[in-house]
Amino acid sequence: MSLAFLFPGQGSQAVGMGVELAEAFEPARRVFEEVDEALGQHLSRLMKEGPEADLTLTENAQPALMAVSLAVVRTLKIDFGVDVTAAAFAAGHSLGEYSALAAAEALSVADTARLLKLRGQAMQRAVPVGEGAMASLIGPKTDVALAEQAAAAGAELGVCVVANDNNQGNVVISGAKAAVDRAIEKAKELGARAIPLNVSAPFHCPLMQPAADEMAAALADAKIIAPRVPIVANVTARPVHDPEEIRRLLVEQVTGRVRWRESVQWLAEQGGVTRFAELGAGKVLTGMAKRIAPDAEGVALNGPADLESFAASL
C-alpha cells in the first residue's frame, strides 16, 4: 500500500473544528497554542466559539485550517507513532499546500501561520470587495474544456480564468464580476450548472497579482528547507523537492490554477498511491480523491476516533 496525505483548503472551515482534538490530545493543544502565539491572536478561541463570519474571513480561515491539519499531524506522530513524513507523498489544496509543507517539515508551524495570515490579508487587499467573483461549474458535462470555453466568453468583458480544476464535474472559474457573470451564462448554455461562490475575493486569477507580489517578498525571507516527503505542487501537478522551486511555485500559486484533478491523477497513476488520507477539517478532498481515483481508498481524519482507527489500520 502506498499512502499520500492530503491537506484541505479554504471552504472546509467550521466553528468547532479542532475542539475534540484539543480536548483529547495534548499535542493538538500545543499546536493551537503555537499558532496563537505566532499570530498574537486567540485564533483557537475563534475556531472554538466563532462567530462564523469572523472565522470565514480569509485571513483567519487560512491559518485556522492549517492549525487543525498540523494538530492531526502532531498527534499522529506523538500519540500514535505515525510519522506523516513516512508517506510516499503529500499534497494540499491551495492554502493546504502550506499545511503539507509544514507537515513535511519544510516550514515551521509558526512561520506557516504567519505566512498564511499575510496571504489571506494580501488576497483580500488585492481586489476591492464586489469587484471580483468566483463560480463553481458542476454537473456530468462539466470538465476543463467546458470551463475554459465559458471563461473565454467571460474574458471578453474582463479577467476570467479557470481557477480550480477540482475533478470531473467540478471546476471553478474566477475573475472580474461582470466577466464571471457572462461565463456563468455561457456555462449554462453548454450544459453545466453554475453556482456563484460566496467568497470575498477572486482567488487564483491574474487579479491576485498584488497579493502574489506581497507573498514573493514574504517568502523571500522565509526559511524553507527540503521537505521530508515529496510535495505535489498545485501549479505543476508534479512533486517538488528544491526549496527555491517551492518558494517560486508558492508565489505562482496565488494567481495560478489549482491543478487538483491532475495532481491526484499523478499520485494514483505515476506515484502508485492506493490510499489517500485527508488530515484536518472536513472531507472535501476525500470525496474528490474517490471521484478522481476510484480504485484508491480515501479516509478523512477529523476527530479522535478517526485517528485511532487509522493508526490501527497501518
Image (cartoon, grey):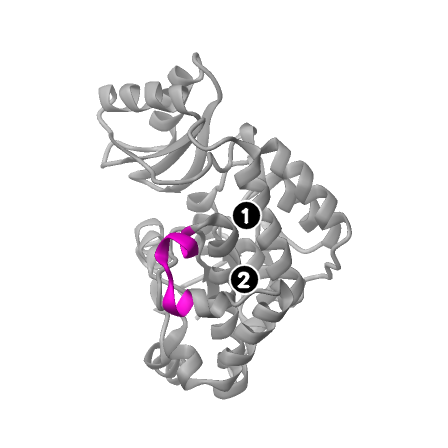
Q: Which of the two discs, 1 and 2, sits closer to the camera?
A: 1
**What residue range appears in magenta?**
47-56
Tag 2: amino acid: Phe
Instruction: Give the numbered dot on residue 24.
Output: none
Say whether disc 1 or disc 2 marks the residue closer to the N-terminus: 2
Residue drawn 48% across the image and 42% down it: 259
- x and y percentages locating residue 307 in the rendered image: 39, 79
217 left or right of 166 in image: right
- Considering every residue shown, the one lying at the far right of the view is 221
The residue tagged 2 is 89
- Residue at image position (68%, 56%) is 241
Q: Amino acid at mark 1?
A: Gly
Instruction: Residue 211 in the image: state x and y as whole percent.
Output: 61, 38
Estimate the spatial distance between the alpha carbons at disc 1 and disc 2, rounded to whole Å.
26 Å
Q: Is residue 30 above or below residue 116?
A: below
Q: Position of residue 258 (x, y in %)?
A: 49, 42
Q: Which SS class for mark 1?
A: helix
Please check the rendered image and state whether residue 259 is part of the magenta-colored stretch, yes or no: no
Q: Secondary structure at mark 2?
A: strand
Q: Residue furthest top?
A: 156
- Residue 67 visible (yes or no): yes
**Disc assigned to residue 120:** 1
Q: Is 139 left, or right, of 89 in this rendering? A: left
- Rendered-image quadrant of the C terminus: bottom left
Q: In screen coordinates, is 291 left or right of 205? A: left
Secondary structure that dominates the magenta span:
helix
Q: Quadrant of the N terminus?
A: bottom left
